[in-house]
Amino acid sequence: MTLKFEKLREGLIVSCQPVKGGPMDTAPIVVAFALAALAGGAQGLRIESAEYVRAVRAATDKPIIGLVKRDLEDFPTRITPWIEDVDALAEAGADIIAYDATLRARPVTTIELIRRIHSHGRLAMADCATIDDARAALSEGADIVGSTLSGYTGGTEPTEPDLELVRNMRALTSNVIAEGCIRTPDHAREALAAGAHSVVVGSAITRPEHVTSWFRSEMNQYLERGGARVS
């Protein structure tokens, strides 16, 4: 493990990924989110796209997990699907490169992605949905496993973190990053208690559109149940 990964131990990683096409989806705002997160105590960052990784890297030397998201016509995998994505992220300054490690069809094998990541001297983070994904990723040489994709490979998307997956991953390796639906400080604490090396928080910090919708949804549910209004 590199020194930068060790700096993330028991740390908070803030995912600065604005809603695509939204008002926050510009490099200066992503950099501002990143610097604000670091000022608040984050130890590292998770940044999407080589462009934004490059911009954030110019502003800080803190650890960066880089990834590229693509919507492919013929494959369900989205996170860093191509070799050229790995190359671009490494060139832009990512310390750790995340890829979709689910057992689904893909344009490039996970072994090829891991080898390419390692050829650049970077760490490979396997974004997993299940414990079988994690086992396979570790057997192929992934350095880190994350609970990132639990609940995001079909069906209703979750609203709570998959702490059971984090616990099961911890039985395989100490290099576990908890990610996905970690929306409260309690969730982050519980993820550490489940054995996470470090914890990623995204939407709850850097997607005001999502946070606003959570508040609005709770208020709507209250009103729909006949909640009292003060006139």
Image (tube, grey):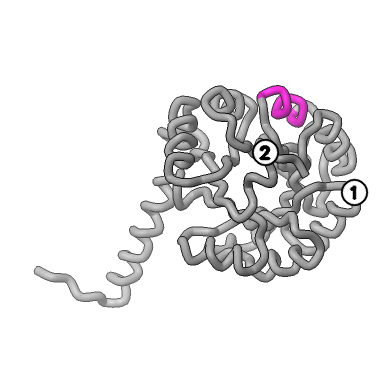
Q: Is residue 121 magenta?
A: no
Q: Is residue 225 left or right of residue 106?
A: left
| Rendered residue at 52%/36% (across/down) | 20
Q: Amino acid at mark 1?
A: Glu
| 87 vs 25, nearest the viewer | 87
Is any atom of residue 182 visible in this view? Answer: yes
Q: Which residue is mark 1?
A: 140
**Classed neighbour count for the residue bearing mark 1: other residues with Cα under 10 Å, few (<14), some (14–19), many (≥20):** some
| 79 vs 225, nearest the viewer | 79
| Rendered residue at 75%/59% (across/down) | 174
Count up the numbered dots: 2
Mainly helix, strand or loop, the magenta region? helix
Residue 221: percent from the left, percent from the top? 35, 69
Disc with the residue nearer the chain's start (2 vs 1): 2
Residue 124: percent from the left, percent from the top? 78, 42
Check whether the beta carbons of the residues at disc 2 and disc 1 lie within 8 A of each other: no
Q: Is residue 90 left or right of residue 118?
A: left
Q: Which residues are magenta?
A: 85-92
Residue at mark 2 to residue at mark 1: CA–CA distance: 25 Å
**Classed neighbour count for the residue bearing mark 2: other residues with Cα under 10 Å, few (<14), some (14–19), many (≥20):** few
Q: Is residue 86 magenta?
A: yes
* Nearest-to-viewer mark from 2 and 1: 1
Report the quarter where the N terminus lies: top right
Is any atom of residue 179 visible in this view? Answer: no
| Rendered residue at 75%/63% (across/down) | 169
Q: Is residue 88 above or below residue 219?
A: above
Q: Which residue is mark 2?
A: 71
Residue 137: percent from the left, percent from the top? 84, 52
Report the quarter where the C terminus lies: bottom left
Q: Secondary structure at mark 1?
A: helix
